[in-house]
Image (tube, grey):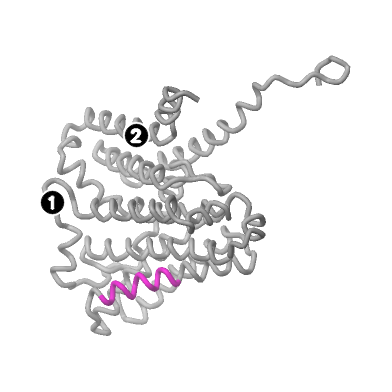
Amino acid sequence: MTGKQESMKKFFRWEMFLVVLLLLEVLVFGAINPRFLRPRILLGSINDFIPICIISLFVTFVLITGGMDIQAGSIVGLASILAGILFEYFHFNIWIASFCAILAGMSCGLFSGFLVAYTGVPPMVVTLGGSFLYAGTAITITKMAGIESHKGISGFPQLFTAFTNFYIGPVPFQALIFLALIIVSFFLLHRTKYGRYVFLCGINRSAAAYSGINTRLVIMSAYGLSGIGAGIVGIILTSYLGTAKADFGKELTLPIITAVVLGGTSILGGRGSIAGTALAALVIGIMRFGLSMSGLNTQYLDIPVGIMLILAVGMRGAAGVLPGLFKRRAPAPGGGPL
């Protein structure tokens, strides 16, 4: 393959398609509402969809192993309310309370990962049960603490609520957090031995086990990473909104899975990239923000996300099926067609 062919191949990679799609969204929504193109508004919009961006990075690990994670949204609410209760009722330092909440999110992920890896229960069943378990736990501890669910817990220190509302010029600090997590997750998945193990578990778990890889531990750890991501988002939302609530994250499942699949990660495992997921998360976030600025009622924003998920799965499936349909059939032994 020549250098020109190599460059053309890179240009037409799925990630480049996502970049073009992202630019088209900006142009279209900017034409509909010129305020959309103001740098502070456009860049600041990431504050509204940072949960999708961060959690999807770590759910990518889960899907690459051949798993599924639909519980992350419930862990977000649990981490948020747990940090609030530790701060308000147990008088923890808010940063220590936040760290404990993230550890709790990791523990939730590890527990579900243990069930998937060591018991053989299908990931969809485990994480569906986990979503109900962790959401119910968050509501239960809210009630036990005598907190009204719709009010949550507020009154956090100003420094805690300020860091997620801070801007460096037109760039929000949350965008820098997202960038840092992209770098960390990219290095972990694409530049370490652990990342290779994650891919191998998704490609052929049996072969990976025969080669000496502790596939159960790798799969369990992938769910733990997803739990960490959800815990981080719970703290970010608590800081950004100044309130800890048990129902944070309840509507995140569809956008998160869509971002991972749209980013090029196979739902069958063995294929995916952090760059693709990050770009897809931005595509979905900008689409939701642009539609809301264009006057679409927020209760309808999941409709285009659902359509995008179906199209992404369909396009990726067609890409694998269509080439085989156009292959020339081999002649039969008698000379006629097979």
- Identify the residue position indicated by label 1 in the image: 168
Camera-side residue: 103 or 147?
103
Q: CA distance from mark 2 to mark 1?
A: 24 Å
Mark 2 residue element: helix
- Identify the residue position indicated by label 2 in the image: 19
Q: Residue at x 38, y 56 (%)?
A: 55
Q: Which mark is residue 24?
A: none
Crowdedness near tag 2: few (<14), some (14–19) or many (≥20) residues, C-alpha within 10 Å: some
Amino acid type at circle 2 is Val
Camera-side residue: 76 or 268?
268
Q: Residue at x 55, y 56 (%)?
A: 67
Q: Is residue 106 magenta?
A: yes
Q: Is residue 81 magenta?
A: no
Q: Horizontal and vertical percent for residue 131? A: 48, 64
Q: Horizontal and vertical percent for residue 276? A: 41, 42
- From the viewer's perspective, is 106 left or right of 122? left
Eyeballing the image, is 103 above or below 24? below
Camera-side residue: 147 or 317?
317
Segment colored magenta: 96-107
Crowdedness near tag 1: few (<14), some (14–19) or many (≥20) residues, C-alpha within 10 Å: few
